[in-house]
Image: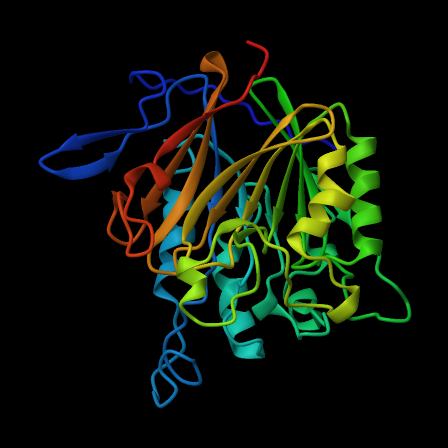
Amino acid sequence: MKFRIVLSYVFVVAAGAGFTLANDTERLRPAPDGSFSVVVIPDTQGYRGRGTKAEPDSGAALTNPVFDNHTRWIVENLDSQRIVFVSHVGDIVDKNNEEQWRLARRHMDRLHGLVPYGISVGNHDMTSGGDSSLFQKSFPAKRFDSFDWYGGTFPGNSERPNVSSDNANSYQLFSAEGLDFVWLHLECNAPDDVLAWADDVLTRHADRRAAVTTHMDLGPIEKPQEASEYVTGPKGRMRWGKIHGERGNSPQQMWDKCFRKHENLFMICSGDQSRTTAYSLPCQGDHGNTVHALLSDYTSSGPLRLVRFLPVENEIEVITFDTSKRRLVQETPYAPDPARHQFRIGYRMGR
């Protein structure tokens, strides 16, 4: 099951130059020839109108301007940014109800059939016990079965039919510029049976370059006891969780039980922690491979991530772009350093 991206168009730009400054406005350049991009959509919780947390007394129709802008921008820039895959880190909705799920589905429908994509289920997308039935209703496995890039889903457990099953954990297969990828999307605090399935997927596709998107990974290492500690607490791989009770695995447990064991794994994308906003952490797997953990949670304020692969340079350029303001992001209140938003990491791609 392989989805082959054919990149045949050429842009006359400086290779690897993702952005430039002009009149003090940061502009995103087209992706250079020979590169390709994966879009990472951060948490899209910014719903407005009736019944929302942001506007509980509003009588206006339900909207999500940032989510709307994200998917419109992706469609408009598939060619110029050479976008081959889209990954959503979860917290697709803010309140786990039918109305928000219908709107989320309409926004994601723009991508359907145009570009391969996967979605991680966040803590807002299910109950604390792990019931993700509304997500499964909106984005079931059967919605993707006809695509050759859709690898499959964790089958679930008959004793808990609404927990973890039917595309709540999935993987996708795609290729670009001669490189083959497997990309896993795992729910928040995935339990042991899901991790066993993920182990099997990564082992069966050991010949592919592997990445994972899961909702929780980086943030305050220990669970904050006071609100200020979400900002001031030491950051790294979190040792606490939110979902599945005792069955759930913290990000640290997910790393120890699954991720660190796979030599082909090179990246973990996550969201969840808006008061960290943007953070990166290189980790060493058991085989000496470097796994780049990348957190992006921009509170549904406008930015998304472009992960641009530059095979000739053996580098990945991480670009944070605001699809509402149409400019690159240089700082945010919790992450004022531009290097948290625009940076490069080394990754050998065999060129």
- Picture quadrant of residue 156: bottom right
Q: Front-most of 321 and 214?
A: 214
Side of 86 where 25 appears, left or right: left
On screen, 31 above or below 52?
Answer: above
Q: Is residue 341 visible?
A: no
**Rendered-image quadrant of the N terminus:** top right
| Residue at the left extreme of this rendering | 23
Q: Front-most of 191 and 206?
A: 191
On screen, 252 above or below 98?
Answer: above
Side of 299 where 136 appears, left or right: right
- Picture quadrant of residue 151: top right
Side of 143 where 351 appears, left or right: left
Q: Is residue 337 visible?
A: yes
Q: Front-most of 278 and 233?
A: 233
Q: What's the image's color scheme?
A: rainbow
Percent x, y of residue 193: 84, 55
Percent x, y of residue 133: 71, 71
Question: Residue at image x 53%, y 63%?
Answer: 92
Question: Residue at image x 72%, y 72%?
Answer: 131
Question: Residue at image x 68%, y 59%?
Answer: 189
Percent x, y of residue 27: 23, 36
Percent x, y of residue 57: 35, 90
